[in-house]
Every structure is written in structure tokens, then in C-alpha cells.
Image (spheres, helix red, strand yellow):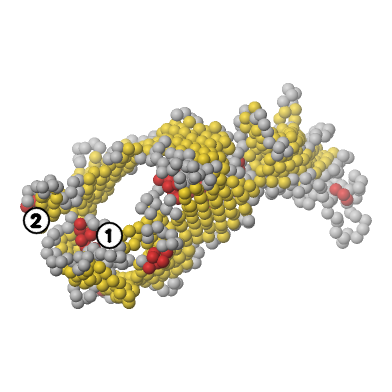
């Protein structure tokens, strides 16, 4: 929305040109009877009855002289001449003249000041060849008016008349043959037009015989028509209303867009009203209607409290039911809620919110043509948080309400609430000289959680959780709809508890080159129930009964870690390019001890018969609880972790022909880790994990590789009757059985790159560039602009760099997985996105991928963008998948004319 400018036009009056011998800038306060003084002091014009009368009044000099029409100092200047005619009470300014009065300034080659009429006249000057030079430029506040002919302004009435003027206000240009201005700022245009194209011959404009602008409210036109390249449309409109309130502070009607969908039919979308209650709260209420029987309602509110917080709250409800004659009927109600609340840093407390929640079918049935990313996103999460620091104490607290949702599995998880109280690390012996005791510190962390999840347990039959993890068996649970009907069951299945953690650590130096860390970690869990297991001989299974009552679970572990740094260098004396290679290795060794808390002395586990043969197993009485259970079995382990980085120092030739060096990473990291449990009766050595990453071509290409190696042998058997192949690990190292170093159980590799001739931009750089461009164009940064920039940055398909001829981003993922006794599984896919400029004004953008295992293309989008100077065209097409659709928009670039558009959308759903 923009302020429709104040434009004035004033008829030309005749005047006589009298040249002066001097050219001096003069400052007038009030005229004086001394005619030849360079600084003229004049009393108010209405006190001058006769030219040359005495300036000393005949009445008492102690009385105040009445104020004239001119209430402030007037400054003026003329480069060629300044001529004063005291008979007609006029001042003539010639060539590059200017006039200042209050918040107005006038520049022209001819300016005439008429003191008697309190008028100001300005125009250009015609030379001997008939060319007009020095046309007036009039400024009032932040508004600038380019006058093609002449203007007249009255100091007393503050009214003006301007002939043939062009002015720019925010995003628009307004021109009129004759414009009259009232004292209240309202203007009347005769034969005016409006456009957002800043060319001398604009691509388009709105033409109307009569236009009225009411400052701070709106611009109203009579019958008007659109002109494209000076060609009018066949049919015009009877009237037009354009809000004239800055920074989108005006209420008004929101005009709909239209289109067609295969399922819901023709539609009118987003028709409603925009409520600008005040400078701090705005609400937009819109509705959708579909020809096949559907409708929708949306409410969007933006709020802000200066120096405290800002945010937005959006609700979208959609209802659709197919006609009874439909062969494949569709019937759904769906809703989505979004809330963003961001505080400004203030005091010692903070409240924030980020909520994205709704029915699980929303993103499967509602196409969002403006956000390709949300259409293919499967997981959403929310968090409402409050935190407070208690000044003068080491304590702080936080409270969170968390939500996570997967629209593919329909699983919903609510943590209401999640309360944490923390005590910062304290050094009770910091004044002691003995280093291990001096650096000893202690902390306390308390966490209370209540979780509501629609994944409920089977009431009959219990499986051992340890066996589930070892054999890859999924927990025996079912997902039920998250709705009001199931609310009693969901609350009954709610999982809650509290956790206390007390870490005690000490750091010290060993043997000069080693750093040691000793720690003792005590953990205590609080639950309101525990599980009692029993063998059900009739069903030959293990069942359970929950026993209510306060339950305390505690366990602890101790550890000692030692690490150091080792550096290796290799210098190339004869190599002209590589100067040296540096290898940095950081080995770390840790000794850990965990007692066996599964014995009957603690009561945290129960020995239960599991079959008719009398075989027994240990079951945790807190299996599946929110904070888990006490560790099973004793552990006395040695952990090993080795971190490596490799860098090269290369020689470079600078512009000054001086030789410089530059460091480049050859391996940004190469990490190896494993541990050996001395207390285990078998499989003492764990799998060897590794991960590495590096980059090339100044970070344009990055590679990540990770996996794990199983060092134990595998025994393969084949059933002679069925031919089914099976296998299991045996307590024997692979090299002892002739199976090499071991078996890779999993390997993952990710390759990502971005290529363009001018270097890619990160989301942060994109946000900064877009914000700076907006500010340089004269825009004001507010919550509306920031929200739009965030939406574009978060969705790469909305952002196009026109000055980059081409851009290509790609990613390749491959994963290998092999479990004992099973065939290996390989998955791989490639995705790519980018844009290509066909010419200076045409660009194609794309986003696609290919799954090599299914041999199918993943969700893809192709778009075409066309820069039409004052217009822009965007075409996007999703050729297949459940969001198959196309979208065409041709609209004015100006932000205040977003409803002046030609829009066509069509969507197809694959249910």
C-alpha cells in the first residue's frame, strides 16, 4: 500500500523581468523602509497598507505586532539575478533559483514571490530556440514533484494548482494535466494516470478523467481503463479505490484468485477482508469456495509490541465432500495451525513459540502452490518455551511444550510439559592448590516430562526389550488416530517421569602432554508406577500388570579419559606448488565402569519364565518408560577414539608477484572409534565406527562417508528343505575364521555440490542481500517485509538470482546395509536443483531427483520466470505425483498492487 501523492497544478501568470546588478543570497525576515539594504526585514504583509509607511506603529510599542500569513523564515536564491519590485510587492528569482519555506523547497529557473497575494509562482524559461529549461522541482516533506509547465502556491490558504506534473510515491508514479490541492492535503486530478513503471513511455498505466486523493485514507477514481503499451483494454471499470495508508496500515477488501482443481473443481480462493486494527495488530480473514462442494476458511494475525515481542498466528480450515455421484468419493475435514512468537532480549526471562500442527491429512490433500517445500515435507515440530535465570544464583529454569508429527506414519507426540531446572557448575575447592581438587566441579540437572503419544502398547503379550534391539524386532505397538474420541486412552497411556543428574568432573594435566578428565555421574529416575511380569501358561506368553506407586531408579558410572595432540609434518623442498602437508591426530582413551544394576539386590529387573520349557529372561520393570531404565549388566570398558585432520600448504602468486601461501583441507576429519568391554562374557569388542568428510574447489563440492565394521565372524547356514539362507554372529574374530578384517554392516556416502560462475550464496547471505536491496529502494523494514523475506529464503524455489547466468546444486546419496544372515540392501538417489538464464529476461528453474532403486523420478518441479520490467511472470509445473499441478501468475511488481494480476492455477491430486 502506498500514499497516493499530493500533486498540485497552478495556472501561469504574466510577469515582468527586471534584471539586477547584484547576485546575493538573501534572507528575509520582515521588509524595512530602507530599500537598498542587502538584508530586508519586512513586517507582516497585512501591516503594510501603503508602500513606504513608517515601520514604527503609532500605538503603544509595548503591544504585540499582529502575526502575518508567513509564520517562519523564508530563504531564497537566484544565480543570475534577484530583483525586488516594491511597487507590486514582488521578488523575481532568475536561473537555478530556489526557495525554502518550512518543509517545502522549490527549484526552478523562474520563481516569483508575490507578497501582496501571499503566492508563489514557478516555471521553466524558453530560450531563443524554443527549448524550455529549468522546469520546477517542488518538494514537500518526503514527496517530490517534477513539474512540466508551471505551479502556483498560496501561503495563506495552503492551496496549490500545478500544470502537468509527475511524482513518485512509494512504488507508484502519478501524473495529471491539472491538479488542485486543498488545505487538508486532499488533491483533485484532471485527466490523470497511475503506473508502477518508471520508464518515460510506461508499459502500462491506469487512465481516469477524475481522481481524488484523500491523504492518509484512500485514492478514489471515476471510470478508468487499463492501457498496455498505450493500447486500452476493450472494457474499463466504473470506479477504483486504492488505499493510501503507508506501511500497509489500511483495512480493506482482499480480492480472490481463481483456478481449477481436478477433485474440488473451479474455485475462488482467499476472498475476504483485511483488518488493520492499529499499528500493532493486523488480521486477515479470507474464505475459499469450490464448485464440487468444498469450502475453506483462513485467519491470519500479525502482532507486535515495540521493544518486547512480535509474532503471527495463522489458522487454515478446509472441508470437502465429493458429490454422491462421484465414483471415487473423497470426504475430509482438515485444519492447520501456525504460530510464531519471537521476543526481544529483555531482562532475565524469555518466552518464545514456534508451532506447526494440524491434522495428519492436511499436507496430503491441500496443495500449497506458493510453497513447494511444505508440499513434500513429512515431519513437523513445534515448541513453546519459557526460560528464566535467577539473578544472583547459579540456578535457571525452563518450561517447554513440545509437539512432533509425522504425516506419513500418522504418529503424533506431545510433551506437555517439559520442565528443567539446572544449577551451573560450581567449584567448591577453587582456592586449593592441588590441581585435580582445584578444578573439581559439580552440577545438578532436573528434568520433568509428561508425554502423550498415539503409539499405544498391546495390552497382551510382552517382548523383551533387549531382544527387540538385538534382533531388530519392532516394539509391539499400534498407532491409533489422535482425536477426541481416543483422548481417554491417550491420557491413560501417557508416559511421565522425572530425572535427576549430578555430574562431578575434574580436569588436570598428566605428564606435561596429556590432559586427563575424571568424572562420576549419578542419575536418579522417578516414576509413578512399575511393571510386574508373569508367565501366562494358557497363552504361553509373558503378560504384565502395572503397579501404581512412587518408584525410584538410581544408577551411576565412573570414567577417566585421557587425550593428547600429535602433529606430523612433511615438507616438499623441490615442489613448486605444494610447500608442506600437516597431519593432526588427536587420540583419546577412556576407562568406564558401570555396575550391574540388573541383579535382584536392586529390584529394577525381574526374572520371568518365558516358555513351557521353564527358560527365564530378565525384564526391566521400567521397560519403555520415558527416561528408560537402569543399565543391564556390568561394564568395564576401554574406549578408543582417534580424530585426524590433514591440511596442505600451497604456494600462490599474488598480483604484486610476491609469493604467498594458503592452507587447504585435504581431510577435514577422519574419526575412528570403538570400545572393549572386559566384563562381557562374549563379543567384548564393539563394532568399529568411522566417519570422514572433506571438500574440494573452495567448498563447492563436499563428501561425507561414514559406516561401521563388525570384527566378528558370521556363521552361514542354508536349510536343505527350503533353501532359506540364514546366519548369525559367532564369538570369534573374522580374521581367525578367514573372513578378513570383518564385515561392513553399514556404509553411507553423501556428495553435495553447488556450481555457478560467480559463487553460491548461503541462506544468510540471501537474506542479507534481499534486505539491503529492499532498504536501498526506499522501503521500510517491518514485520510484514521480514515475514516475506523469511518465506522466500526458506523456499529456494522462490528465490532467483537474475545476475547469475546459471546455477546448479546437486546431491548424491548411497547407503549400504547388511544384517547377519540377511542379504545386503543398497539404496541410492540423486537430486538436483538450479536455474538457467535463456536470456537477460528469461530464466528456467528446476528441482528434481531420481531414485535408482525404484527407478523412478522423485517429486519434481519445473518453472519459468520472465522479467517484464514493471511486470513479472512465473510459471511452475509439477508434472507428476500427488501434487501434480501448474501455476501461472502475471502481476505488477509493485507490492501495493498484488491483486492486479492475471492468475491461473490448476491442480491434480493422486489419491
Q: Position of residue 23 (x, y in %)?
A: 75, 38
Residue 732's disc number = 2
Residue 828, compared with residue 440, is above or below; it is above
Is residue 133 toward the left or the right of residue 431 in the image?
right
**Distance in Å between CA atoms under marks 2 and 1:** 30 Å
To which quarter of the image does residue 890 belong? top right
To which quarter of the image does residue 712 belong? bottom left
Q: Residue at x 21, y 63 (%)?
A: 466
The one nearer the camera, 861 or 693, is 861
> How many marks are shown on the rendered structure?
2
Is residue 362 toward the left or the right of residue 725 in the image?
right
Residue 490 seen in this snapshot: yes
Placement of the C terminus among the 4 image quadrants: top left
Q: Position of residue 440 (x, y in %)?
A: 28, 72
Residue 38's disc number = none
Q: Residue at x 54, y 48 (%)?
A: 295
The one nearer the camera, 806 or 629, is 629
Residue 145 seen in this snapshot: no
Q: Position of residue 740 (x, y in %)?
A: 10, 48
Q: Residues within 10 Å of mark 1 (few under 14, many from 20)?
A: some
Q: Secondary structure at mark 2?
A: strand
Q: Which mark is in front, 2 or 1? A: 1
Placement of the N terminus among the 4 image quadrants: top right
Q: Position of residue 526 (x, y in %)?
A: 32, 73
Residue to which mark 1 is pinned: 475
The one nearer the camera, 508 or 162, is 162
The one nearer the camera, 598 or 570, is 598
Q: Residue at x 49, y 48 (%)?
A: 321
Amino acid at each position: 500500500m502506498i500514499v497516493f501523492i499530493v500533486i498540485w497544478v497552478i495556472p501561469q501568470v504574466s510577469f515582468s523581468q527586471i534584471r539586477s546588478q547584484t547576485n546575493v543570497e538573501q534572507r528575509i525576515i520582515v521588509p524595512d523602509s530602507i530599500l537598498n539594504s542587502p538584508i530586508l526585514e519586512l513586517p507582516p504583509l497585512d501591516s503594510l497598507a501603503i508602500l513606504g509607511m513608517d515601520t514604527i506603529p503609532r500605538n503603544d510599542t509595548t503591544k504585540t505586532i499582529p502575526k502575518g500569513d508567513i509564520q517562519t523564515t523564508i530563504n531564497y536564491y537566484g544565480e543570475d539575478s534577484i530583483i525586488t519590485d516594491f511597487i507590486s510587492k514582488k521578488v523575481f528569482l532568475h536561473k537555478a533559483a530556489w526557495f525554502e519555506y518550512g518543509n517545502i523547497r522549490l527549484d526552478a529557473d523562474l520563481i516569483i514571490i508575490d507578497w501582496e497575494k501571499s503566492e508563489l509562482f514557478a516555471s521553466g524559461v524558453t530560450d531563443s530556440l524554443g527549448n524550455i529549461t529549468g522546469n520546477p522541482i517542488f518538494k514537500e516533506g518526503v514527496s517530490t514533484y517534477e513539474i512540466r509547465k508551471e505551479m502556483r502556491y498560496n501561503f495563506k490558504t495552503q492551496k496549490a494548482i500545478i500544470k502537468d506534473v509527475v511524482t513518485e510515491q512509494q512504488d507508484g508514479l502519478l501524473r495529471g494535466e491539472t491538479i488542485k490541492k486543498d488545505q487538508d492535503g486532499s488533491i483533485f486530478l484532471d485527466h490523470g494516470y497511475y503506473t508502477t513503471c518508471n520508464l518515460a513511455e510506461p508499459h502500462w498505466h491506469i487512465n481516469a478523467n477524475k481522481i481524488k486523493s484523500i491523504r492518509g485514507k484512500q485514492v478514489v477514481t471515476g471510470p478508468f481503463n487499463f492501457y498496455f503499451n498505450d493500447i486500452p483494454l476493450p472494457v474499463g471499470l466504473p470506479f477504483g479505490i486504492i488505499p493510501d495508508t503507508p506501511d500497509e496500515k489500511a483495512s480493506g477488501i482482499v480480492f480472490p484468485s481463481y483456478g481449477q482443481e481436478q477433485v474440488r473443481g473451479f474455485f475462488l480462493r482467499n476472498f475476504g477482508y483485511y483488518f488493520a486494527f492499529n499499528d500493532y495488530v493486523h488480521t486477515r480473514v479470507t474464505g475459499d469456495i469450490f464448485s464440487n462442494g468444498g469450502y475453506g476458511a483462513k485467519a491470519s494475525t500479525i502482532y507486535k509490541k515495540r521493544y518486547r515481542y512480535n509474532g503471527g498466528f495463522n489458522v487454515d480450515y478446509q472441508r470437502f465432500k465429493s458429490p454422491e455421484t462421484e465414483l471415487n468419493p473423497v470426504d475430509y475435514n482438515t485444519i492447520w495451525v501456525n504460530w510464531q512468537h519471537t521476543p526481544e532480549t529483555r531482562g532475565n526471562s524469555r518466552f518464545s513459540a514456534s508451532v506447526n500442527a494440524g491434522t495428519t491429512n492436511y499436507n496430503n490433500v491441500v496443495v500449497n502452490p506458493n510453497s513447494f517445500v511444505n508440499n513434500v515435507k513429512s515431519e513437523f515440530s513445534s515448541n513453546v518455551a519459557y526460560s528464566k535465570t535467577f539473578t544472583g544464583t547459579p540456578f535457571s529454569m525452563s518450561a517447554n511444550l513440545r509437539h512432533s508429527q509425522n504425516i506419513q506414519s500418522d504418529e503424533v507426540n506431545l510433551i506437555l510439559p517439559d520442565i528443567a531446572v539446572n544449577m551451573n557448575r560450581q567449584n567448591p575447592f577453587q582456592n586449593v592448590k592441588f590441581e585435580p581438587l582445584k578444578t573439581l566441579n559439580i552440577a545438578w540437572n532436573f528434568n520433568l516430562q509428561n508425554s502423550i503419544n498415539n503409539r499405544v502398547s498391546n495390552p497382551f503379550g510382552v517382548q523383551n526389550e533387549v531382544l527387540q534391539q538385538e534382533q531388530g524386532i519392532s516394539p509391539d505397538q499400534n498407532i491409533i488416530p489422535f482425536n477426541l474420541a481416543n483422548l481417554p486412552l491417550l491420557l491413560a497411556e501417557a508416559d511421565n517421569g522425572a530425572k535427576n543428574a549430578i555430574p562431578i568432573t575434574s580436569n588436570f594435566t598428566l605428564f606435561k602432554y596429556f590432559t586427563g578428565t575424571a568424572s562420576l555421574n549419578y542419575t536418579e529416575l522417578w516414576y509413578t508406577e512399575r511393571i510386574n511380569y508373569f508367565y501366562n501358561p494358557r497363552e504361553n506368553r509373558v503378560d504384565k500388570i502395572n503397579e501404581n506407586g512412587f518408584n525410584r531408579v538410581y544408577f551411576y558410572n565412573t570414567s577417566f579419559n585421557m587425550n593428547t595432540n600429535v602433529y606430523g609434518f612433511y615438507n616438499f623442498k623441490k615442489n613448486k606448488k605444494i610447500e608442506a602437508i600437516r597431519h593432526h591426530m588427536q587420540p583419546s582413551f577412556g576407562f568406564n565402569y558401570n555396575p550391574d544394576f540388573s541383579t535382584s539386590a536392586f529390584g529394577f529387573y525381574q526374572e520371568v519364565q518365558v516358555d513351557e520349557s521353564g527358560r527365564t529372561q530378565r525384564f526391566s520393570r521400567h521397560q519403555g518408560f520415558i527416561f528408560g531404565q537402569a543399565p543391564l549388566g556390568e561394564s568395564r570398558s576401554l574406549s578408543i577414539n582417534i580424530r585426524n585432520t590433514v591440511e596442505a600448504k600451497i604456494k600462490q602468486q599474488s598480483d604484486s608477484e610476491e609469493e604467498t601461501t594458503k592452507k587447504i583441507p585435504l581431510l577435514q576429519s577422519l574419526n575412528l572409534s570403538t570400545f572393549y568391554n572386559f566384563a562381557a562374557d562374549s563379543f567384548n569388542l564393539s563394532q568399529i565406527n568411522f566417519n570422514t568428510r572433506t571438500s574440494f574447489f573452495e567448498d563447492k563440492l563436499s563428501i561425507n562417508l561414514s559406516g561401521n565394521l563388525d570384527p566378528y565372524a558370521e556363521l552361514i547356514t542354508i536349510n536343505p528343505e527350503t533353501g532359506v539362507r540364514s546366519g548369525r554372529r559367532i564369538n570369534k574374530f573374522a580374521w581367525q575364521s578367514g573372513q578378513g578384517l570383518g564385515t561392513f554392516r553399514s556404509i553411507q556416502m553423501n556428495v553435495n555440490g553447488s556450481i555457478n560462475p560467480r559463487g553460491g550464496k548461503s541462506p544468510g547471505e540471501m537474506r542479507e542481500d534481499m534486505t539491503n536491496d529492499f532498504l536501498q529502494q526506499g522501503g521500510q523494514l517491518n514485520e510484514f517485509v521480514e515475514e516475506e523475506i523469511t518465506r522466500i529464503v526458506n523456499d529456494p524455489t522462490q528465490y532467483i538470482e537474475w545476475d547469475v547466468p546459471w546455477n546448479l546444486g546437486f546431491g548424491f546419496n548411497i547407503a549400504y546395509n547388511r544384517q547377519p544372515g540377511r542379504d545386503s540392501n543398497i539404496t541410492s538417489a540423486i537430486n538436483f536443483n538450479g536455474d538457467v538464464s535463456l536470456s537477460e529476461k528469461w530464466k528456467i528453474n528446476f528441482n528434481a531427483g531420481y531414485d535408482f532403486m525404484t527407478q523412478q523420478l522423485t517429486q519434481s518441479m519445473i518453472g519459468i520466470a520472465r522479467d517484464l520490467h514493471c511486470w513479472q511472470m512465473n510459471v511452475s509445473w509439477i508434472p507428476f505425483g500427488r501434487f501434480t499441478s501448474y501455476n501461472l501468475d502475471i502481476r505488477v511488481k509493485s507490492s501495493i498492487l498484488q491483486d492486479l494480476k492475471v492468475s491461473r492455477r490448476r491442480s491434480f491430486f493422486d489419491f
